[in-house]
Image: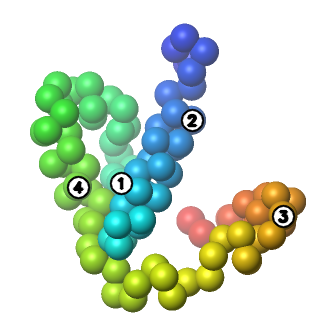
């Protein structure tokens, strides 16, 4: 179901991806997984207060300090110099990831 032209599931996926990027940019990693039995957008509404929701999601995500610094990894633009090469990687069969 879409609300005002927005698909909540896609909006959630984008928000989660942005949050992961921000967490990684400050030298942290997410080692936990979101519970499959929960709908994150519903949980946000049910908790009522942002602080309570943030505390629960932090526990789910299990954020830890990176073992090795991100600066040791190759730059994205060096590894994928064109938009096409980046899109090709995103379109790889991900059936084995689940």
Nearer-the-camera pick, 93 or 66: 66
The residue that disc 4 covers is 58
**Can you give x and y, in whole percent of width and height, for residue 43 in the image?**
27, 34
Asked if the residues shown at circle 2 and circle 3 are in contact, with their CB atoms under 8 angstroms apart, the answer is no
Quadrant where the N terminus sits is top right
The residue that disc 2 covers is 10
Badge 3 marks a residue whose secondary structure is: loop
The residue that disc 3 covers is 82
Quadrant where the C terminus sits is bottom right
Badge 2 marks a residue whose secondary structure is: helix
Judge the density around disc 2: few (<14), some (14-19), many (≥20) Cα neighbours within 10 Å: few
Chain-order first, disc 1 or disc 3: 1
Q: In the image, is 96 to the left or to the right of 67?
A: right
**Can you give x and y, in whole percent of width and height, for residue 66 in the image?**
34, 80
Q: Residue at x 51, y 43 (%)?
A: 13
Q: Residue farthest to the top?
A: 4
């Amino acid at each position: 179901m879409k609300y005002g032209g927005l698909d909540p599931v896609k909006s959630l996926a984008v928000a989660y991806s942005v949050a992961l990027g921000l967490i990684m940019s400050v030298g942290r990693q997410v080692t936990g997984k979101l519970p499959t039995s929960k709908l994150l957008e519903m949980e946000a509404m049910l908790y009522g207060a942002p602080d309570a929701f943030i505390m629960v999601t932090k526990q789910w995500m299990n954020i830890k300090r990176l073992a090795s610094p991100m600066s040791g990894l190759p730059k994205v633009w060096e590894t994928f110099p064109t938009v096409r090469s980046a899109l090709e990687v995103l379109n790889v069969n991900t059936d084995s990831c689940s």
